[in-house]
Amino acid sequence: MNTSTRLTRYLIEKSIPYQEIEHFHSNSSICSAITANISLKQIAKAVLLKNHEDKKLMAILPAAHKISLSALNKNLHGCFRLMKEQEVYQVFSDCNHGAVPPAAEAYHLSMVCERELDQLAEVYLEAGDHETLLRVSQEDFKAIMSSGKHLHFSREVFH
């Protein structure tokens, strides 16, 4: 499988330029960073959440970070929890399992973005497969993240 069709359609519709970065097959953002020789801090990963009303939320954070559900729920005055894998697979049916693009609008989802990503000159996005990252400028990343809240809800776990 190649880049997500919904993701590429979304980027084209929004006139967001990107560069495809191919890398060896990997099953995690950590391995993608290593095989593509990119800092974990520059890769934006998506974590899918939902609340008791089945409202879905995409949390976007650096691959070097771990989400703090307590911090996120406190900031949002909510009660979000991780979605089950099978539910994620259904939402991202045009992607390889576990290769979720951090572009919530392309999938009609609400989002929240970790503020630390706003400081980077360029950001790398999972493309929907396990062999491609998309490099976008900070300006274009901000356009992709424009509909979400920008909060601090994670902590660095890999240096």
Image: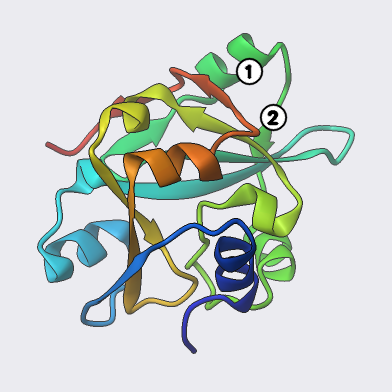
Q: Amino acid at mark 2?
A: Phe
Find residue 136 and report its horizontal and vertical position in percent: 35, 54
SS class, disc 2? loop
Provide the residue designation for mark 1.
73
Tag 1 and tag 2, C-beta contact below 8 Å: yes
Q: Residues within 10 Å of mark 2 (few under 14, many from 20)?
A: many
Find residue 118 and report its horizontal and vertical position in percent: 36, 28
> If you read the primary sequence from the N terminus, does the residue marked by circle 1 or circle 2 appear first?
1
Q: Quadrant of the C terminus?
A: top left
Q: Residue furthest front?
A: 15
Left or right, 67 with reference to 73:
left
Residue appearing at x 55%, y 71% in the figure: 8
Find residue 58 and report its horizontal and vertical position in percent: 61, 42
Provide the residue designation for mark 2.
80
Q: Residues within 10 Å of mark 1 (few under 14, many from 20)?
A: some
SS class, disc 1? helix
